Image (cartoon, rainbow, N blue to C red):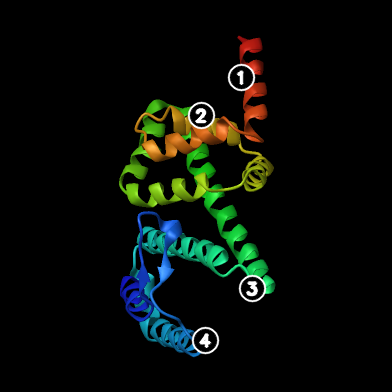
Amino acid sequence: MEDFFRLVISCFPINATEQLQRLKPKRYISPMEKELLYKLFEKQIQHAGASAVTLFPVKIATNALIAFSLFCGLVGFQKKEYAENSNPLKIERWEVINNRILDGILCLFFYTGVAEAIANSYCHEASSVVASSRLDHPHFWELVASRANESSSHARDKAVKSIEIWGLSKGPISSLYALLSSCKPLPPLQYVAFVILSAEPVMHSAFKCDTASLGEG
């Protein structure tokens, strides 16, 4: 996967500025070039075969998040740069794909917090094991936090409802508090948990949870 990314960068070089959102192609990329690269990628996947399965899942996921972040920046730039000539159908298809990926990233963000919250309800040592596992892959969780931070309130609302549907002993609000007060915290996850808790639609639910806890006390 890393070799493939190098190939893409070599074939389609970009000008990188201070922010990812300002990436732009160095030259015009024809549809034929795009098609050829896609065919090359297909062949590489076919030849890789079973060897690809031996790659570490977290490394694959990290590469995927890096590629997704770069692509989001490039698409955002092209929307502004070529707004008059953009194809509405292509933009609509991209929005559908983008939203689907963000839904998965947000669920992953909430799930890791839920896991720690449930573990902590049994014993501190159990929650420490969950929190420690994140420290083994800080870059991956930084990327997850970064994309979660860019999500819309609508996407966050969907993620919260999807977690509630699972009917676990701990819900999305407990998940966010677990990330905030983790015994072995990762600052990017803490920051995004605070941001989500401080904004709608989660803020209202979090306030009700706090009020209920005070009433029980």
**Cα gap from disc 1 to disc 4, whole angstroms:** 55 Å
| Residue 13 image position (x, y, % from top left) | 35, 75
Label 2, secondary structure: give it.
helix
Name above or below for residue 115 compared with residue 146: above
The amino acid marked with disc number 1 is Asp
| Residue 75 image position (x, y, % from top left) | 52, 65
Residue at the spot of label 4: 31
**Cα gap from disc 2 to disc 3, whole angstroms:** 39 Å
Front residue of this view, candidates 128 and 10: 10
Q: Kindly report which numbered mark, 1 or 3, lies closer to the viewer in this rendering.
A: 3
**Cα gap from disc 2 to disc 1, whole angstroms:** 11 Å
Sequence-wise first label, 2 or 1? 2
Sequence-wise first label, 4 or 2? 4
The reply to whether discs 4 and 3 touch (Cβ–Cβ < 8 Å) is no
Label 3, secondary structure: give it.
helix
Name above or below for residue 99 compared with residue 3: above
Quarter assignment of residue 53: bottom left
Residue at the spot of label 2: 177
| Residue 122 image position (x, y, % from top left) | 47, 28
Residue at the spot of label 3: 90
Sequence-wise first label, 2 or 3? 3
In the picture, the quarter occupied by the N terminus is bottom left
In the picture, the quarter occupied by the C terminus is top right
